[in-house]
Amino acid sequence: MEYWEVGHRAFAYWDEDEYFYPATIISIEGEDIFVRFDTGEEEWTDAEYLEEYMAEVGEEIECKYSQDDMYYSATILEVDGERIQVEFEDGVVEWSTLNRVRFYLD
């Protein structure tokens, strides 16, 4: 994405564990972008640390499993807007949503 606007959804980098998590852009002041993660934490960042709020089939991510709310490695099988179908490493397949995803960029 070339630009960001207040209210846009994004995956924002979190220094604490080096993952990207779902967030909403709250404010923009010049190059500085203030985000609120879905967990409630807020911080200033810049566009370099934001990724589009989207998913692609075949993408490797970590997703919260519906049975225990813990993150596990998974592959995206299908995308329907913000809904995604994932297959976990143990073969379990389930529908989830983008706000239950995190990922790490190499």
Image: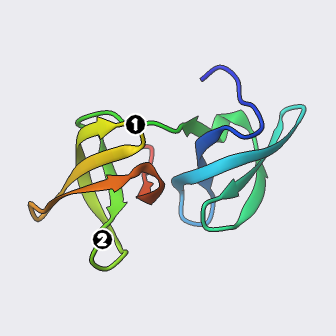
Residue at 24% across, 54% down: 74
Disc 2 element: loop
Residue type highlighted by circle 2:
Ser
Dividing the picture into quadrants, the one containing residue 40 is bottom right
Labelled disc at residue 81: 1
Residue 93 position in % (x across, y down):
15, 57
Structural crowding at the residue carrying mark 1, measured as other residues with C-alpha within 10 Å and reported as few (<14), some (14–19) or many (≥20): few
* Residue beneath disc 2: 66
The CA distance from mark 2 to mark 1 is 19 Å
The percent coordinates of residue 6 (x first, y second) are: 77, 38
Q: Is residue 64 above or below residue 1?
A: below
Q: Residues within 10 Å of mark 2 (few under 14, many from 20)?
A: few
Q: Earlier in the sequence, mark 2 or mark 1?
A: 2
Q: Residue furthest right?
A: 29
| Side of 92 where 23 appears, left or right | right
Q: Relative to residue 4, is residue 45 depicted above or below?
A: below
Total numbered circles? 2
The N terminus lies in quadrant: top right
The picture places residue 27, in percent across and down from the top left corner, at 84, 44
**Above or below 15: residue 61:** above
Instruction: Name the residue at 77% across, 57% down.
Output: 43
**Could you say whether the residue bearing mark 1 is in a helix, strand or loop?**
loop
Which of the numbered marks, if any, corresponds to residue 18? none
Residue displayed at 66% across by 35% down: 48
Residue at the farthest left position: 91
Q: Nearer the viewer, residue 88 or 99?
A: 99
Q: Is 65 displayed left or right of 89 in the figure? A: right
Residue 106 location, x and y as percent? 42, 43
